[in-house]
Amino acid sequence: MYGSPVHVACIMDGNGRWAKQRGLPRTAGHTAGEENLAAVVRSAVRLGIDHLTVFGFSTENWVRPRQEVRHILGLHKKLFGRVAELNELNVRVRWIGRPFDDPAARTPRYVQRAIAKAIRDTEANTGMTLTVAFDYGSRTEIAHAAETLRRAGRDITVEAIDSALYEPDLPSVDVLVRTSGETRVSNFLLWQAHGAAISFASAAWPDYSADDLRAAVDLALTSRDQHR
Ligand code: IPE
Ligand code: IPE
Ligand code: MG
């Protein structure tokens, strides 16, 4: 729609602070965040975005209180269960994260099953690709790619690493969004986001709006034009 595919990647941050401001438990912030993700997906489809990749849970997030982790796991089951809605939007779901057979992987079986089912049940869709990063860490991903190549006796070149990432078809990121006024890079798509524009939004993730998303896309397009 924009001449070449647009890839927006979001670090969905600030759920806890959103809840705290309202005197609610952190879990309520995560629930609101999951609901807003569903709304952002609809906005992204309307805006003609080709790839939306979101950071749902990091390899570092497992140290959070057990009850919070359990709540976030349940929300991912719910998210990957939104198949009817995604099919209606012609959205294809993908997942990136530590492979389930990796000894360090922590994703429980019931979430693995929800992920596998969502991927299977939406794979024929031809519109936007929604990639959810769960049990994901970018440095672990790059190390995994290098290790895969080493074991195969391959040279470690940029192209080879590209081909050994969790989702080799994922294009480079055009704009990296981080919400909740946090102006730091995260352990998210470090390899794929080379040259990306960065859009820092003051809204906490549950309040991230269609207008915020449009501003991020505009930023990506102007930065792209300036670099032609
Ligand atoms: C992002 O919100 C969601 C996850 C990391 C799972 P946070 O839970 O990090 O919210 P803050 O940063 O504490 O406000
Ligand atoms: C980034 O948020 C991870 C996700 C959005 C899943 P965090 O709140 O975990 O990140 P840091 O630790 O503050 O960078
Ligand atoms: Mg945070």
Image: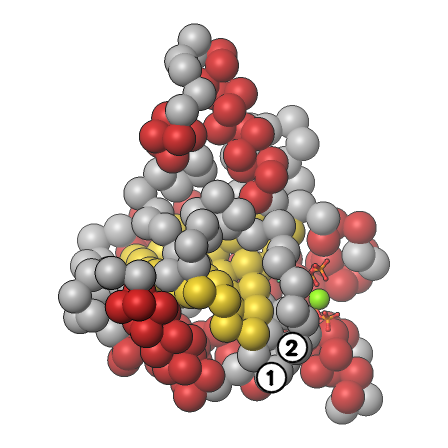
Mark 2 vs 1: CB contact within 8 A: yes
Residue type at numbered disc 2 = Ser
Q: Position of residue 118 (x, y in %)?
A: 38, 54
Mark 2 sits near ligand 1, with its Cβ under 8 Å away: yes
Q: Residue at x 66, y 40 (%)?
A: 106
The one of 27 and 204 positioned closer to us in this rendering: 204
Q: Position of residue 217 (x, y in %)?
A: 36, 74
- Which of pointers 2 and 1 lies earlier in the amino acid sequence? 2
Furthest residue toward bottom: 22
Residue 90 appearing in the image:
no
Q: Is residue 28 left or right of residue 126?
A: right
SS at mark 1? loop
| 136 in relation to 211, above or below | above
Q: Is residue 208 left or right of residue 152?
A: right
Q: Which residue is identified by label 2?
A: 180
Quadrant containing the C terminus in the rendered view: bottom left
- Quadrant of the image occupied by residue 88: bottom left
Residue 208 appearing in the image:
yes
Quadrant containing the N terminus in the rendered view: bottom left
Q: Residue at x 35, y 38 (%)?
A: 168
Q: Residue at x 79, y 61 (%)?
A: 67
Residue type at numbered disc 1 = Ala
| 26 in relation to 22, above or below | above
Q: Position of residue 100 (x, y in %)?
A: 55, 35
Q: Residue at x 72, y 53 (%)?
A: 61
Q: Which mark is residue 182?
A: none
Neighbor class of circle 1 (other Cα within 10 Å; few <14, some 14-19, many 20+) is: some
Q: Is residue 51 left or right of residue 179?
A: left
Q: Is residue 20 left or right of residue 217?
A: right
Q: Which residue is identified by label 1?
A: 203
The one of 178 and 108 positioned closer to us in this rendering: 178
